[in-house]
Amino acid sequence: MLNMEKQIMDFNVFIEQDEDGIYVAKVPELDGCYTQGKTLEEVIERIREAIEVCLEADKEEVNPMRFVGMQKVSIERSQLV
């Protein structure tokens, strides 16, 4: 009989809202791991499912990054008129 030990992993999840009000969640540590939902509750539930699928598909060892911070950066762009 196999004795499997459970491991808790924490991931940074970035959530943004698009122009239609849909929430989009992304996990930068896992390539291609993203989802969307109509509410925050829905997108959190879906990103948990997406993380599980990504971890199952990617059998490599995953080392979540330590979150340091987030900063909005503004730039000025010239536009042709």
Image (spheres, rainbow, N blue to C red):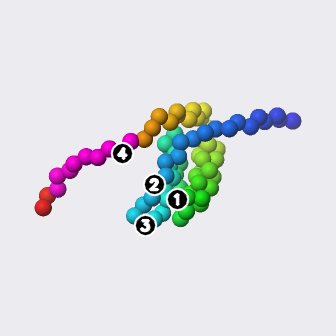
Q: Tell me the SS state at disc 4.
A: loop
The answer to whether residue 46 shows anywhere in this view is no
Marked residue nearer the N-terminal end (3 or 4)? 3
Q: Is residue 17 above or below residue 33?
A: below
What residue is disc 3 on? 20
Distance from Cα at disc 3 to Cα at disc 4? 21 Å
Q: Does the magenta stretch mainly form a helix, a strand or a loop?
A: loop
The answer to whether residue 5 shows anywhere in this view is yes
Give percent across and percent down for residue 10.
61, 39
Amino acid carrying mark 4 in the image:
Lys
Question: Which residue is nearer to you in this view: 73 or 78?
Answer: 73
Circle 2 Cα neighbour tier, 10 Å, few/some/many (<14 / 14–19 / ≥20): some
Distance from Cα at disc 2 to Cα at disc 3? 11 Å
Distance from Cα at disc 4 to Cα at disc 2? 13 Å
What residue is disc 2 on? 16
Marked residue nearer the N-terminal end (4 or 1)? 1
What residue is disc 1 on? 36
Amino acid carrying mark 2 in the image:
Glu
Q: Quadrant of residue 69?
A: top left
In the rendered structure, does residue 74 fall within the stretch colored magenta? yes
Q: Tell me the SS state at disc 2.
A: strand
Dots 2, 3 in contact, CB < 8 A: no
Give percent across and percent down for residue 81.
12, 61
Q: Which residues are magenta?
A: 71-79
Marked residue nearer the N-terminal end (1 or 2)? 2
Circle 4 Cα neighbour tier, 10 Å, few/some/many (<14 / 14–19 / ≥20): few
Q: Would you say 1 lies left or right of 25 here?
A: right
Give the quadrant of the N terminus.
Answer: top right
Distance from Cα at disc 3 to Cα at disc 1? 12 Å
* Residue at point 64%, 44% (across, down): 56
Circle 3 Cα neighbour tier, 10 Å, few/some/many (<14 / 14–19 / ≥20): few
What residue is disc 4 on? 72
